[in-house]
Amino acid sequence: MEALYAASPLAPATVALVHQHLGQLLAAAVEDGLLARNPAARARLPRAAAARAQPVPLDVAEAIRLALPAWCRVVVPLAVGSGLRQGEASGLTADRVDVLRRTLRVDRQLDRSRKLAEPKTASSHRTVPLATVVANALAEHLAEHPAKPGQLVIRSPAGDPLDLNRFGYHWRLATEEAGMGGLRYHDLRHTFASLLLSRGVSVKAVAEWLGHASPVVTLNTYAHVMPTDEDLGRRVLDQVLVPDAEDQLRTTSPPTGL
């Protein structure tokens, strides 16, 4: 069984699915007395290569934003600056945005039936701090496309929600126009996490803002963008041990008036 899996040209995830169904068939054969034991029960599966999330350059994100229709351009700063998933951005209502306090509450998403539903997981319920640029983008969008409390922030000119199919259509056109065909909206979420982690924001905080169930998930996905311990150690020690310019001048200059 292991040799069969190892020689398979299928992706590891597909092999795991085949293994699941094959194991069920063989277990039934054991129950029917056709086999003494299930040969798939202890077979080891090929390991999937760890996915390394890659951030989208900010100039590329801006090109995609400009290529989108004006009524849905705000989805780009929502992902890059808040880490929202597509369903969360489409399901955002005006009463969940607090521009003055610069926070955004995520507790719903737009599902495939175009209805508001619970987020992906319990940990996806969260409050995300808004950078000034994101708060401004939301304020400008709401000024041009007003939404009452409880009303979706992003709607088509006809008032329709930005469901998965409609979003996918406009996103595909915009990424192709920007020369980045095949880029996923989720990749902008990677940019949000990478910008924060690469500059020393705590993994725990970023995990909460992303809606991850555990910081371990965040570490497994984004460890490669974080500063190494050596780099971080040097920076901390330089800040603590090296006196600032004023102190250096005061300690090295000869006293005056003598």
Image (cartoon, grey):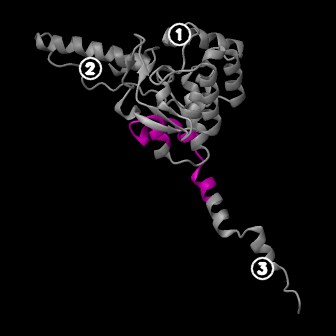
* Left or right side of 13 for 132: right
Question: The residue under label 3 is which amino acid type?
Answer: Thr
Q: Is residue 231 located in the magenta-colored stretch of the structure?
A: yes
The image quadrant where one finds the N terminus is top left
Q: Secondary structure at mark 1?
A: loop
Instruction: Name, please, the residue furthest toward the bottom.
Output: 258
Percent x, y of residue 200? 58, 49
Observer-nearest of 27 and 87: 87
Dominant SS of magenta comes to helix
Q: Secondary structure at mark 3?
A: helix
Q: First in sequence: mark 1 or mark 2?
A: 2
Which of discs 2 and 3 lies nearer the camera? The answer is: 3
Percent x, y of residue 186? 54, 24
Percent x, y of residue 185? 56, 21
Q: Which residue is mark 1?
A: 159
**For the residues bearing labels 3 and 1, Cβ distance under 8 angstroms:** no
